[in-house]
Amino acid sequence: KETDSSSTTIDGYQLVAKILKSLGIDAAFGVLGIPVTKLGICCQQEKVRFISTRHELPASYAAGAFGYLEGKPGVCITVSGPGCLHALAGLASATVNCFPMILLSGAAENSQIDRGAFQECDQLRAAVPHAKQVFRVDDITDSARFLCRAFHVARSGRPGGVYIEFPSNVLHQKLEREKVEELLSFSKEFISSPRNMPVPTATVVQQTVQFLRNAERPLVVIGKGANYARAEEELAGFINTLKIPFLATPMGKGCIPDSHPQSAAAARSLVLKEADVVLLVGARLNWILHYGKPPRWSNQCKFIQLDICEEEFYRNTNIALAVFGDIQESVRLLHNAVKLEPFEVPVDWRNKVRQKCDENTKKLESRLQESKMPLDFHCALNAMRQVIASLPHPKPILVSEGANTMDFGRLILPVEEPRSRLDAGTWGTMGVGMGYAIASAVSNPGRSVIALEGDSAFGFSGMEIETIIRYNLPILTVVFNNNGIYGGTEKSADPADPAPTCFVPNAHYEKIAEAFGGLSYWIETAEQLGKALREALASKKPALLNVIIDPAAGTESGSLTSHN
Ligand code: ADP
Ligand code: MG
């Protein structure tokens, strides 16, 4: 074997794995095959944990989520041609969600291009629209230079996906061992140089504070950018001083706990409609925030946007003030400026928000107390909520997707820690859940992960249950099984076929876990759900809980009915 340490040369596989390790990459996700098989093995030799999934799609989603959770690029490794194309969805998704990620693919060699070579494909051009930058490494001695660039571009400015490919002949190239040290010293020097994060000028800081001081009904909106920037301490300090109501976006949740007294989560419609000054912290005014426009927002509302991407400002609506900077440091500066002359936001506004929250919370609580058979979303989620509430901190990471499952889950299951809730994200992508759950478990050793999946969402990557069990990841996959997309009640217009949104009714998804030796549960009642959750969490073993939900309980498109 060429991996023999007495050999005077090493090859491209070994070199790439060594460079990845020198960049601080501790895990990679992918599917092995020609020409990258040996790369997975070399990764293991270099102590880069290699998570080998059953399809490139979940591997690519895992790499993006891993980048988000770790604050540095997550890596997905694919074979040439089809394998690479399968992973482009994850690359695109990472770029759209602002997750740092590197898709590293094998490729057919130059001399074989246009010959109809094995898995030949113009991958580079396919990747261009979905990546911040693409690289092709044509000589092994360029590996360190290009991998450092890929790493740098993925994490810098607004984070996103970068594509890099290694033709098979380059992976087979040999290099003298002395040269290896030289290349590694390049990547080690790169990674150890300090990063400069942008901060707003003193004037902009002053202006921001002035806006907030003069506001009658101010609001902070916390997006997933704040979670990514690890700004939880700075934001908590800022919010506590000002007592300013805040609203988190679906993945901005947890940066400040949902249970915080200033959380306006239960008064979302009210605060959107009535806020007069809004500080956006790492959140875009896209569809998730109704484009910042009436009727959901007041047309008098002044937006102050804090973001690391200057190009993002003025999209969809004019903003009163652009605060260009990294969230962590910028919020610290804002808080310092407030502390010089402290103030609190008007008490009438705080009381109004609190009152509305109490009212809505009460309504939801009484709805949650209704017991239904078969289970509906509220009943099932209430059982889960009770178990989660009884657990010590840190709570399990929650991954959630599926239309109704995700919408109701977001309302009912509180998030108490930063970077602890991942969902369909900016694209509203169904099928990310199993990859995200795997990334969450790998990034948080010892901590449980709950993957709450609609039956349709689960189906995209259900085979990853085998991956989860093979790596013994403490992931509880909870399938809310209502027999179809949105629900299994649609009538078919073709007597020969089922309706296109309906699945096999009462399917035994739990048998998938059973097939590979995981824990499996068929669940029809709230008591069974609570018991199974507690048991599976205590065991720290992979489990699949198949929860039978009333097929008529959901609504079409979940909370997005007007889009369909
Ligand atoms: P959400 O879906 O939660 O609203 P978005 O993905 O729309 O979140 O927005 C996240 C924003 O955070 C992006 O505009 C991105 O440029 C920004 N961002 C990411 N990292 C940082 C950072 N370190 N500092 C400031 N802004 C950041
Ligand atoms: Mg369903």
Image (cartoon, rainbow, N blue to C red):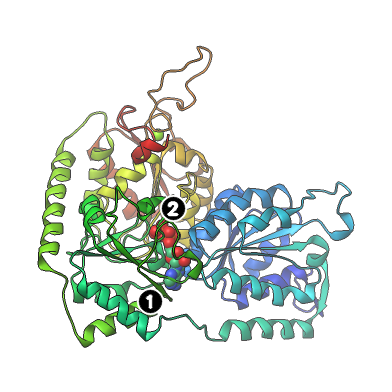
Indicate yes or no: mark 1 CB to ligand 1 under 8 Å. Answer: yes
Indicate yes or no: mark 2 CB to ligand 1 under 8 Å. Answer: yes
Q: Report the side of 331 relative to 356 (left or right).
A: right
The residue depicted at 75 percent of the width and 71 percent of the height is 3
Q: Identify the image quadrant of residue 38.
A: bottom right
Residue 156 seen in render: yes
The residue depicted at 67 percent of the width and 49 percent of the height is 85
- Distance (Cα) linking label 1 and label 2: 22 Å
Q: Which one is earlier in the sequence, the residue at label 1 or at label 2?
A: 1
Question: What amino acid is labelled 1 in the image?
Answer: Gln
**Residue under label 2:** 425
Residue 240 seen in render: no
User: Could you classify mark 1 by the number of other residues whose Cα lies within 10 Å: few (under 14), some (14-19), or many (20 or more)?
Assistant: many
Locate the N terminus and report the quarter of the image it occupies: bottom right
Q: Position of residue 359 (x, y in %)?
A: 12, 49
Q: Position of residue 278 (x, y in %)?
A: 29, 64
Q: Position of residue 369 (x, y in %)?
A: 15, 40
Q: Identify the image quadrant of residue 327.
A: bottom left
Q: Secondary structure at mark 1?
A: helix
User: Could you classify mark 2 by the number of other residues whose Cα lies within 10 Å: few (under 14), some (14-19), or many (20 or more)?
Assistant: many
